[in-house]
Image (cartoon, grey):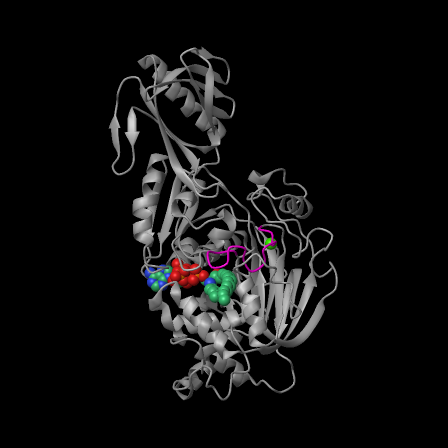
Amino acid sequence: MEIESVRVESSVWVGKKRFRALLSGWYFSWTELDKKNREKKTISVPIGEVVAVAEGRVEIQPQKKAEDTDRDFTLFYVKRRSSGGRIWTLGRTQFCCPSRDLRDQWVAQLKTALKTHCSSRPHRLLVFINPYGGKKRGKEIYLSLVAPLFELAGISSHVVVTERANQARDHILKKDLTGFDGVICVGGDGMFSELLHGVIGRTQQEAGISEHDPTVMLQPCDLHIGIIPAGSTDCVCFATVGVNDPVTSALHIVIGDSQPLDVCSVHHQSTLVRYSVSLVGYGFYGDVLAESERHRWMGPLRYDYSGCLVYLCNRSYRGIVQYLPADPQISSPRDSTRCLSGCRVCSESTERLFPHSDSCSSLYSRQLSQYSIESEGEWISVEGRFRCVSLTCISSSCPRSPKGLSPSAHLADGTGDLILVRDTNPLGFLTYLHRHTTTQDQFDLPFVEVHRVKAVRFSLPPDGDYDDEEREQSISEVLEDPEKLCESDIEFSKDGSQQYLAERQKEQEMKDERKKREFFCGPCCSKPPAVSVWNCDGEILPYTEISCRFKYF
Ligand SMILES: CCCCCCCCCCCCC/C=C/[C@@H](O)[C@H](COP(=O)(O)O)NC(=O)CCCCC
Ligand SMILES: Nc1ncnc2c1ncn2[C@@H]1O[C@H](COP(=O)(O)OP(=O)(O)O)[C@@H](O)[C@H]1O
Ligand SMILES: [Ca+2]
């Protein structure tokens, strides 16, 4: 065995075949040799993708067994399953060395290489499982597919199976998190949103920053959030990882991959309402969500069912949308780029927004540079009747729509995409929706506009068509249980809560009167509602008039 500073080489056997194994710099490779020592096929694994190395012949599934044959060691690593390489599985190769000494040296050298090259890997994780998300398989997915990988990689985890909505958010906001390298969400976009609110909220609390000030620059978060997809849409996972596969996500977490993400903060006047990563949608997507809440028992299918019902209702809503365009020289929602980890536009945006950060690894520790959105251009106003108004920070691709709401949106460029779908005939709108599922351009329709933006405001036309009661009515009637909606938002409304509480009181007073009326009246409806609701990553917002800003994390 030759040992230079970072070069280790020897003969090994894999099954009955002889190989030359080589550890050189950032790679471990093994090359098959024929009887005449001629090299055949080489398999090469970056050290950054090695999950674990163990003495003996080790298997983790179906059961972990270690057979410590003197001269063997087992290497576990990331293996790409699909041709596009997006789906990952756990690769496992058992090597047999010429002697025990040599085996021990290989194991020691590989472990040292892992320590040296993989310092950003997590050691201790706090895992939140929503047992009711998606098809209610969160617990099973975690225990059977994810926990064994964490254990193999030497990651210890503290698991909380939630018993109520917002438990994970409150835990992150209030409990001692010392020693945790990250928090993991086992669930869908709603569950991810809970963790996001916990992590952003806690970071701002500790930094003494008020989230209610819409102009404030938020403190970046040190705690990373990992997602194990077990929800209904899994859009945040799909748009960042490229698939919604629990094993792929667990392996990304194990090897310490991280991806900065834009976040949209949604304010109503001077109150922070929520943060969003995937969809802030009014009209069609708001109505679908409101309807789907009645059919939660259907699981993920509730969105398809409700989508059909809402489509048949053929609704459009009036509104005024104001937006602050992003710099068109940098990128456009109509270009054909697809943002992935390491994207040039995102790296250049990082450099522009945070000139002193040197690399991706510093994204979570730098201070945000102060810059004013208001000084960067003029607001543009569009008034009209819309089928839907959608805002998204990322592509929002998901299994239902593999290219997403805005296929060229960037994950971390500090901007979002605003999609305005004006009122059109039912066939036109169906064409728009259907194009989300095909390769056809959904923006290439005369009634659709898309803009890359830094901020957006939405209001209702001030012509007397809408009174406060009508707005309040629409907001509350979409939920079977309005109390639940209030409960989930009250935490975020602490500082600017007076107006919120007054509105809630008013809503209570009108509750009995409204109880028997249906918000979704179906195709036979005689008086459609004048206002829709906002869908914010799967939660209904309690306000119609909102302002949104895109922030970079
Ligand atoms: C004729 C075919 C019509 C197909 C229409 C497809 C349009 C798909 C666009 C998907 C956008 C997804 C944006 C993601 C939103 C999620 O954050 C949110 C909550 O997810 P979860 O917590 O996992 O439940 N999901 C939705 O609001 C569902 C929207 C579904 C619309 C049909
Ligand atoms: N134990 C629980 N009981 C009820 N609701 C919960 C629980 N844990 C989390 N939630 C809430 O369930 C909502 C939906 O969760 P999510 O995991 O996104 O599933 P789905 O994708 O099916 O909507 C989230 O808003 C979350 O706050
Ligand atoms: Ca973006």
Q: Main secondary structure of the magenta part?
A: loop
- Could you say where residue 203 lies in the image, as x and y percent from the top left? 51, 52
**Residue 184 shown left or right of residue 431 in the figure:** left
Give me the residue at 54% from left, 61% from top.
436
**Residue 535 shown left or right of residue 338 in the figure:** left
Q: Is residue 165 above or below residue 152?
A: below
Q: Is residue 199 above or below residue 344?
A: below
Question: Is 35 within the magenta?
Answer: no
Work out whether residue 328 can be spotted.
Answer: yes
- The residues colored magenta run 397-411
Question: Is 399 within the magenta?
Answer: yes
Q: Toward the viewer: 167 or 37?
A: 37
Q: Quadrant of ligand 2?
A: bottom left
- Could you say where residue 416 lies in the image, as x and y percent from the top left? 61, 58
Q: Toward the viewer: 150 or 402?
A: 402
- Could you say where residue 233 lies in the image, as x and y percent from the top left? 44, 59
Q: Toward the viewer: 41 or 226?
A: 41
Give me the residue at 75% from left, 61% from top.
377
The N terminus - image quarter? top left
